[in-house]
Image (spheres, rainbow, N blue to C red):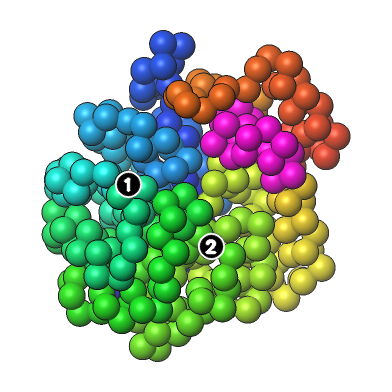
Amino acid sequence: MAHIQGLLVAPFTPFDKNGDVNLEPIARYAEMLHRNGLKGVFINGSSGEGYMLSDEERMLLAEKWVEVAPKDFKVIVHVGSTSVRSAHRLAQHAQKIGAWGIGSMASPFPKVGRIEELVKYCEEIASGAPNLPFYYYHIPVFNGAYLPMTDFLQAVDGRIPNFAGIKFTNENLYEFNQCKLYKDGKYDLLHGLDETLLAGLAACDVQGGISGTANYCGNVLVGVIEAFRAGDLQKARELQNYNQDVINVIARYRGNIVAGKRIMKLMGLDLGGNRTPFRNITDEEEAQIKAELEAIDFFNKGNKL
């Protein structure tokens, strides 16, 4: 399978004032991401509050993203669920509607403790969409699945025909690189930590990634890649440091899922609040976030609507 080149985005799920899924902003959302240099989306994952959505809501979102996606804009659907039968059904749906690919993290309950358990879980899900590439989403801080990914690749190799690779959201670049080198680069390794993108480019020759902060500063991260490829390491460092400046802001206000989503509103794309148990940004916090972003000139440097 061809490896992904460039950055995909993990988008937020838009909600209306009643907390229901709001499909209306998605066309504008997709166009904005495409215009700022992003290559696709990985929907209904952690940034999209996927585990807090019903299967029906997740399918509606997938249908809308596929419908409005610009030409050559990849739509990967996260289909993972605590119910493997639901995940299999969501995978079938993603293939039926013409999504580019599917993916799943390990279920947060029950926690996966053995490689074989994880392979079996992925196998049952991937079989629901045999014609689509399947990506395992490695994010152990979320679900406690701290399993060696090199061992996972060895176990899954040849067993799941449509297994494409790993979205690797973990600090261990050594392990990332060992996975990338497995069988001369057989599998696609997608970088998932925005704050270390430049390190991944330099140490591991990262080709593709999936990003949360690219929702609002994807142009900055695309710039990191372009500067590095052009041999301008100083510019690449400056842009990576700027991305970290933005991350420092969201880290003070409950992170990307909560603060990042409110940044979208400040940019002019209101995607609503977050579902319980997330604690939504207050009006006072919104004013503070805006002031902190203005102090680093974010509204001139971030994504352009």
- Residue 64: where, in percent of width, then height? 30, 33
What x and y, as percent, mark residue 241? 77, 56
Q: Is residue 43 above or below residue 194?
A: above
Q: Which residue is mark 1?
A: 109
> So how many labels did they put on this image?
2
The answer to whether the residue labelled 2 contacts the one labelled 1, judged by CB atoms less than 8 Å apart, is no
Q: In the image, which is nearer the foreground, mark 2 or mark 1? A: 1
Residue positioned 48% across, 40% down in the render:
47
For label 1, the SS is: loop
| Residue 249 lies in the magenta stretch | yes
- Residue type at mark 2? Asn
User: What's the residue at 65%, 76% (across, down)?
Assistant: 202
Amino acid bearing label 1:
Phe
| Magenta residues, start to end | 246-265
State the residue in front, 125 or 83. Answer: 83
Taking the image as shown, residue 174 lies to the left or right of residue 30, namely right
Q: Which mark is residue 170?
A: 2
